[in-house]
Amino acid sequence: MPSLFSHPIQLLLIVIVVVPACVNRQTDSETVGSRKLAADLSRLDKESHKQAEPVLPDQIPADIVSFCSDCHALPNPDSFPREVWYDEIEKGYEFYARSGRTDLRPPLLQNVLKFYRQHAPEQIVFPQPAEVDSELRARFKIEQVNWKVPGQLSPAISCVRWFQMEPDGASGLVVTDMRDGSINLIQPSPNRSVHRLLGRVDNPARVTVSDLDQDGQTDFVVSDLGSFSPYDHTLGKVIWLHRRNNVENFETTVLASQLGRVADVSVADYAGDNQPDLVVAEFGHRKTGSLRLLTNTSDSGTTATGTGDSGRLRFESKSLDICPGHMEVLSNDWNGDGNMDFATITSQEFECVDLFINDIRKFNQYRVWTGRDLVVGSVGLHLADLDADGDQDILCVNGDCFDNNFANLSHGIQVMENLGNFRFAEHRLAELPGAYRAVTGDIDGDNDLDIIAVANLPTTVYPQSLIDQNPVSILVLEQIGAWQFRPRVLERGTPRYPALETADFNGDGKIDFAVGTQLFDTDPSNSPAAMLPRLSIWWQQ
């Protein structure tokens, strides 16, 4: 079941590599190994379900450490309930067998299985969520915004962005739907919001607001996944949605194609020549994926209407990283040298946040944060000066569990406090199963930045006890002191929100916010989630 990007199934206990040729047929030795595994699982299943034993780093067998953390963090036994490790370990060994690698020495499968079962909990128990909070100073009225779509497709809103349209100065929300391919303009007004279709692509993931051809008119750069479901392909694109000659209608121009699933694009002058360049986060899947710099080589000041020909937008592509899983890229001058740098968040087996520092000749990479293991579900970034010290801190969200439908206790929100000189201090702010997006704004009007976060969980999320608890859907973290945030639950029971934006939508001096909905065929027609609109605008009263 796809999410906004959908990690492929996490490859637990293996080293994941991109290899030119993968084994696609089962060999005789693999068949024998599968039979032996089945026997081992049957034997282990008869063991008593004793209490999980705590594990210390020096107690982990060396052969498991060397094999299972060769190129990624060692999986934690408490990431899954005891019974789930059967399938995860079998899956891991199968992937290693198919990878073509022969340089590692896999430990005996039954020993790995015994170790993880011994130290895994019988059940994962999530803390009980708080009731909807009645003490938050801000009060909201919800407006449901719907619009007609072909075939009555259910929504899969992937991005909501607040922007100001130039040259007329009108503001609005640009909203993308990765299922029906639409790029929509919502002009918000309490109970009178207006919808307009701007264009369609295949499967838009995100949209970046920019005047790419520098003609004084607002354009949009669209990250096109190229498919709704995740798989390796070359259908991904970077698309320019732009106006010509001041007309209201938009047209599309492909700036880059033959890519894997494109998750995000950042637009900034990375070359220092006063022309906008692009950094492309190509999520890909298993064999595809990269981070690319598209340097603008167009003639300065020309009006761009296409690609490839003289007098039009032209870009030279350069690979900055060949790993799959790049989710989001945000530009910022991290060292104050006048050159535009950027930050990225990467999922898959990497689960990390990196800075790419620009010295014009090349980008130097600095690791800021690494997830504790393979199932943290890194999904998004947001930059804000949360401590009001004049620099940008990094808000990091992890909670994507659409790869295997398992939520875990590592899901939540943390911030990397910027200490300068590429040093950061991590502050864990909140636990939130299915955390998918977090942005900032002064929600309660006390002159500091608060945080709004939303959750997005699959209908059939495991463990079932999480659904039984009526999980949190929308959470406010009210800032009450230096790196101190008080959680305020605004809504629970409908965690179907992959997209979120905050701003003062109606100019009354109060922060409002909008959330976009993703629904699934497995949502019962009479369930609260199935009743959600495509877009909900929370107007602060």
Image (tube, rainbow, N blue to C red):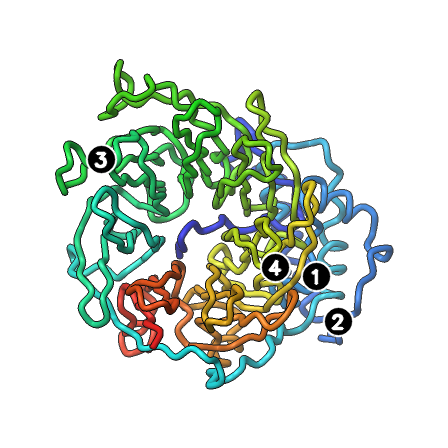
Residue designated by label 1: 77
In front of the other: label 3 or label 2? 3
Q: Amino acid at mark 3?
A: Thr
Residue designated by label 2: 52
Say which mark, if any, is on residue 430.
none
SS for dot 2:
loop
User: Which residue lies at the image location 52% right of the left edge and 64% below the top edge?
Assistant: 449
Q: Amino acid at mark 1?
A: Pro
User: Which residue lies at the image location 58% right of the left edge and 75% below the top edge?
Assistant: 486
Marks 2 and 1, how far apart at CA: 9 Å
* The image quarter in which residue 227 lies: top left
**Mark 3 surroundings within 10 Å by alpha-carbon count, few (fewer than 14), some (14 through 19), many (20 or more):** some
Tag 2 near tag 1, CB within 8 Å: yes
Q: Amino acid at mark 2?
A: Ala
Residue designated by label 4: 387
Q: Nearer the viewer, residue 195 or 440?
A: 440
User: Looking at the image, is mark 3 or mark 2 earlier in the sequence?
Assistant: 2
Q: Can residue 215 be seen in the rendering of this structure?
A: yes
User: Which residue lies at the image location 75% right of the left edge and 76% below the top edge?
Assistant: 50
Work out which quarter of the rendered image holds the C terminus and state it. bottom left
Give coordinates of residue 102: x percent, y percent.
69, 32
Give coordinates of residue 347: x percent, y percent.
55, 47
- 82 shown above or below 279: below
